[in-house]
Amino acid sequence: MKKFLFGGLVGAAVLSGMAGCAQIKKPTPQVKAAAVGLRFDQVGRVSLYAGEPCTPQIMFNFHGSRATVWLAAPRRETEILTDAANKNQRLHILGKWQRGTQSQCSYVEVTGAELTR
């Protein structure tokens, strides 16, 4: 009985220690969102989104002339964006501003993406 009790206490201590080490990623600074439905038209670079997005559609960070903007895209554009992110290429992005389910969660739904020089 003592071995079981001691083992349980050690296991609980290890789990609580691991939980204390978990770090919460801060969201990337974003451009203030335009009104939902307004057009987005910028040139810049993309990277894959790392972290917990405020809505499941967000998969990319867009780094343009302003701050970072979150992007969501349909399959065809996702392939273009992923390839550009892996190769650090510049893109021309067209889209519309959308609002996520959480407050202060705005992103651009990509309607077009093409490589630029």
Image (tube, rainbow, N blue to C red):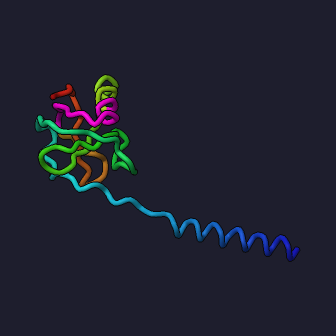
Question: Is 93 located above or below residue 27 in the figure?
Answer: above
Residue at figure coordinates x 39%, y 50% from the top left: 51
Q: In which quadrant of the rendered view does residue 37 lie?
A: top left
Which quadrant, please, contains the N terminus? Answer: bottom right
Going by the image, does 1 lie left or right of 7?
A: right
Looking at the image, can residue 114 be seen?
A: yes
Residue at figure coordinates x 80%, y 74% from the top left: 5
Residue at figure coordinates x 22%, y 39% from the top left: 45
How far across and down, in percent of the image, does residue 75 sit?
A: 34, 25
Q: Over which residues does the magenta segment extend? A: 82-96
Residue at the extreme right: 1
Camera-nearest residue between 67 and 74: 67
Which quadrant, please, contains the C terminus? Answer: top left
How far across and down, in percent of the image, does residue 42 sit?
A: 12, 37
How far across and down, in percent of the image, does residue 105 sit?
A: 26, 50
Looking at the image, can residue 58 be seen?
A: no
Camera-nearest residue between 51 and 100: 51
